[in-house]
Image: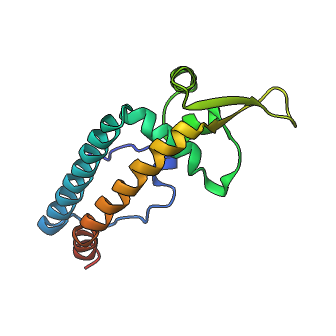
Amino acid sequence: MKKVALKEDVRQNAPAVSRTPTLADYQALSEFRHLIRCFLEFSQKAAQGVGLTPRQHQALLAIKGFPGGGPVTVGNLAHRLRIRHHTAVELVDRLTEAGLVQRIDDPEDHRRVLLTLTERADGHLAELSAVHLDELARIEPMLKGVLARRSK
């Protein structure tokens, strides 16, 4: 059987699997992926409901929820969204034009530009985050069920 090559950073915290998957494993993975797709579909519709694209919503959330709460650069955003740097630059350009993000020169390193959300973006993000948290609470029992089956 041919092994699938995965990027190292994707598997860095994953435990090694040394057994052949069972039918229950396949069913758990299928259900998990289904729940993820349902959540992503919900998220896409919610973002569109407030006039954002799903990618814009993801970017706003990545900026607001950046680990450690520190300043976010375009490079940080690209990493968090798993996109190329130039794609992140284009996304930030569109977010800036839409009045959702501001670029601020880093006072400590003038080569860097930091990203902050505008009040308008904060409002959209608060609304979207509230409905997303409600949706996560709704599907939490299903996710726990899938994960509990997987750990047996």
Specify how the rendered protein is coloured. Answer: rainbow
Is 65 rendered above or below residue 44? Answer: below
Which residue is at 36% across, 37% downward?
50
Residue placed at 84% from the left, 27% from the top?
110
Q: Is residue 33 left or right of residue 98?
A: left
Q: Quadrant of residue 119?
A: top right
In the image: residue 50, left or right of residue 88: left
Given residues 123 and 66, the one toward you in this image is: 123
* Res. 62 visible in picture: yes
Q: What residue is at 41 percent from the left and 33 percent from the top?
A: 55
Q: Furthest residue to the left?
A: 23
Tell me if residue 1 can be seen.
no
Question: Which quadrant is home to the C terminus?
Answer: bottom left
**Residue toward you, 46 or 70:** 46
Residue 141 falls left or right of residue 50 = left
What is the x, y in percent for residue 7? Answer: 46, 43
Whether residue 119 is situated above or below residue 137 in the rendered picture: above
